[in-house]
Image (spheres, rainbow, N blue to C red):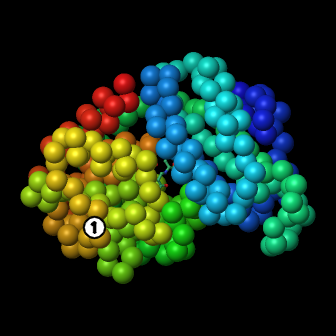
Amino acid sequence: MQVYWNGSLVDESAVRISFDDRGFLFGDGVYEVVRVYHHQFFEWSRHMARLERSLRGIALPGVDLAAITQGADRLLEQFPEADGALYLEITRGAYPRAHAFPPDGTKPTVLMWIRPVPARNMDAWHDGVSVMTTYDDRWAKVWIKTIGLLPNVLAKEQAHRQGLFDAIFVRDGMVTEATSSNVFIAQNGQLMTAPVTNYILPGITREVLLEEAQRLQLPVVQQPFSVEALKAADEVFLTGTTTEVLPVTKVDGHLIGTGHAGPIARMLLDALWSRAG
Ligand code: PDD
């Protein structure tokens, strides 16, 4: 597989990452995941705008986003499939381990590749997935798309060990998001999702779906909602680049709505797909 590594397209076997890389030592880096639909990036400029905010969030200046965009286009030209996902990671580069930032001039490590996405699980789509809720013990800057995802990884594993698809984070009784997606509920035709604060990752899919909901004249509010509201909702669904729109039909063993994918989730998934081309 060809990958983009610090400005060049190389075979994956040529990539050398130092053990002094701050991504490896400190989780000192940020990332993006961008969907490829029909040989094209979906919402590239929004992902770049979020990346820029994340880079500012970790005080890592001087990353050439135009070069990254060019590199991504070259990777896309070589990607044989119509659908896939690009993963991009930028770390503060390699320097002998010390907490303080390395000296100016230390080159960030930039790595990027495109892989096929697993086939859609249509059963999960029709019947929905089961999730648990868990205490949101992440830090207070989850708006930064940092590679430091240990709380997300641990929560996902906790869910998997119980035979569940995912965990939904709850902070002070209010739903924030899931381990790698945002959460929407629908109640009496009204859509609700947590507002953008420092306690959620502002999802690009979330943003696109808010626009689509408006276009479809579905009432939607960005407002905090409780675990009780989550469990009492007519529909619950997860949204994200890899998740797309995925109905949730069980929360902590509680059946949601009819126990099947709801009409609003279906409508929004269709809207997402038609927007993707
Ligand atoms: N995850 N919330 C969290 C914690 C996420 O990690 C993600 C994305 C989202 C949804 O954001 P978007 O719609 O921009 O993909 C929300 C990516 C896909 C991942 O970590 O693989």
Could you say which is closer to the camera, residue 190 or residue 82?
190
Q: To which quarter of the image does residue 199 belong?
A: bottom left
Q: Classify the position of the C terminus by image quarter.
A: top left
- Crowdedness near tag 1: few (<14), some (14–19) or many (≥20) residues, C-alpha within 10 Å: few
Q: Is residue 33 left or right of residue 73?
A: left
**Residue 70 location in percent, x, y?**
67, 30
Q: Amino acid at mark 1?
A: Gln
Could you say which is closer to the camera, residue 237 or residue 131?
237
Evaluate whether residue 220 shows in this view: yes
Q: Residue furthest bottom?
A: 172
In the depicted structure, whether residue 17 falls above or below residue 104: above
Query: What residue does disc 1 label?
Result: 223
Could you say which is closer to the camera, residue 135 or residue 225?
225
Residue at 16% x, 66% y: name it. Answer: 232
Residue at 71% x, 27% y: name it. Answer: 2
Residue at 73% x, 48% y: name it. Answer: 63
